Image: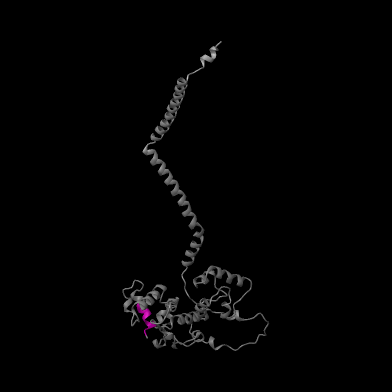
Amino acid sequence: MQNPLRDFFYFSRGERRGILTLIAATGIVLLSGYLISAWQHRENISPADIAEQAAARQEYDEFMASLEEQEQPRSRWKHTSYERKEAEIPVVLVPFNPNKADSMAFRHLGLPAWMVKNILHYRSKGGKFRKPEDFKKMYGMTEEQYSNLSPYIYIAPEDTARNTPQLYIPQPAQAENIKYASGTVIDLNLADTTELKKIPGIGSGIARLIVGYRQRLGGFYQIEQLKDIHLDTRQLQAWFSIKPTDIHHINLNHSSVDRLRSHPYINFYQAKAIVEYRKKKGSLTSLKPFILYEEFTEADLERISHYVCFE
């Protein structure tokens, strides 16, 4: 007896082949539909969207690069600012007492802030400079710095005394306290502080100021130069005479930039111009080449001319 259910699910070889072909075709159709849908979704991205994505990526890259650039100079900002502040303080070499000068006076002498702090700390602890060589012993002081400053160091007599008890011995009146009579004339380029103090109106401070400035100049060529150190020449005119032959000259063909700029009438840029001209064009025979230089005025060249030679 045949089983009806078996007969229902029985397929011939041809029928089975057809069924398998149908299943395969159905799978291919479904897979094709998925691939076509995905492709269409990709094709639907407009060029504007692509450009927007590229711009956003570029903006992000630029932002990250700017962060790196800002981070690099940040560590150097304080140091650069400090160096700029250091460079803004002009160097002016004038006579000074290392036991009395304040911080700004030391800074104008070209000393760095940290060295000035050391000097003031040394003085606050009772330290005292009793002779110019003592100033050389400050920590960090170089040979070049001391060499530039040593001609301007002034140690007051009271600073040289030791704290030891001494007997008081009355002294006769000093000859330096005697003032010259009216009509006396002395050589401004030869008089020392003792002789200068014999002129009415000139005390120890003014006498040291005149001698110190004379050393820096190399000598005076006219009385009016005392105005450079804020003295009233009208009152002093009758007391002084000047011999131009007493002036010390600077050889422009051999002097360095540092030597030239140490003179009160020659600044750094003028000294640099002189040395550069010498390197490029050879020895100088006059100051005429510098008439057209912006570093020099006619007044500069006129007063410099009294202190230079070309040997």
Judged left or right of residue 199, residue 289 is left
Residue lying furthest top: 1
Q: Overall secondary structure of the magenta stretch?
A: helix
Q: Quadrant of residue 42?
A: top left
Q: Position of residue 169 (x, y in %)?
A: 65, 87
Q: Nearer the viewer, residue 127 or 35?
A: 35
Residue 240, above or below 82? below
Residue 238 in magenta?
no
Quadrant housing the C terminus = bottom left
Q: Nearer the viewer, residue 149 or 54?
A: 54
Residue 308 in magenta?
yes
What residue is shown at x 45% (from left), y 46% (from top)? 60
Disc tally is: 0
Residue range corresponding to the magenta coloring:
301-310
Quadrant housing the N terminus = top right
What residue is shown at x 49% (from left), y 57% (from top)? 72
Judged left or right of residue 66, residue 126 is right
Q: Position of residue 31 (x, y in %)?
A: 44, 29
Residue 184, above or below 38? below
Residue 38 at least partly seen: yes
Q: Position of residue 206 (x, y in %)?
A: 49, 79
What residue is shown at x 61% (from left), y 72% (from top)? 122
Residue 201 at least partly seen: no
Q: Position of residue 302 (x, y in %)?
A: 35, 79
Tell me how the rendering is colored.
Answer: one colour
